[in-house]
Image (cartoon, grey):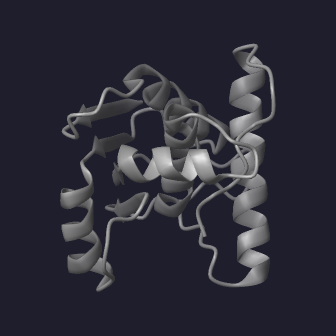
Amino acid sequence: MSIDVNNESGTEVDEQAILDIARYALARMRIHPLSELSVIVVDADAMEQLHIQWMDLPGPTDVMSFPMDELRPPSKDDDEPPQGLLGDIVLCPEVAKKQGEEAPTQHTMDEELQLLTVHGVLHLLGYDHEEPDEKAEMFGLQAAIVDGWRAERGLTGPSPAPTVS
């Protein structure tokens, strides 16, 4: 799996954890091991520009996903996953920090960025949360991936609750 993490935000973030959880999520979703993903960490001004340009919404947001080859997880266990370019995930640590502090189960900016990385991966794989059934599926899968990753690393305490809407 080729995953690039590029921090352009000026904020110190745990880039290794972002890389590790992205790799874990993609393996869990059975994405081809030669697929490629880019994660870019930007400041609030850059995220606001992207949010306006692509969503026509004001202000910075927490995460945006830009799919390339529209890869999907294989439908059956014995299906060979396709190889390709997943796309880009853009994260904003300033928004992540605020969301982590305001979450019902307060958590750090880095924990929120890990959650948002998984959220971005799922969007790249075609998951959405516009409808209640889609939201239940996506957020359930997101929680399972984050919990599995945390358990493998022996991390204790509650996993971050979803703060993206």
Percent coordinates x, y for residue 134 in the rendering: 72, 75
Closest to the observer, 7 or 38: 7
Residue at (42, 20) in percent of width and height = 16
Q: Quadrant of residue 50?
A: bottom left
For the question of whether residue 29 can be seen, the reply is yes
Residue at (42, 64) in percent of width and height = 70
Q: How many marks?
A: 0
77 vs 20, left or right, is: right
36 vs 125, left or right, is: left
Closest to the observer, 46 or 24: 46
Residue that protrudes farthest toward the top in the picture: 154
Percent coordinates x, y for residue 89 in the rendering: 36, 52
Give the quadrant of the C terminus. Answer: bottom right
Residue at (62, 42) in percent of width and height = 30
Residue at (76, 31) in percent of width and height = 148
Closest to the observer, 38 or 6: 6
Give the quadrant of the N terminus. Answer: top left
Q: Quadrant of residue 41?
A: top left
Q: Is residue 2 above or below residue 99?
A: above
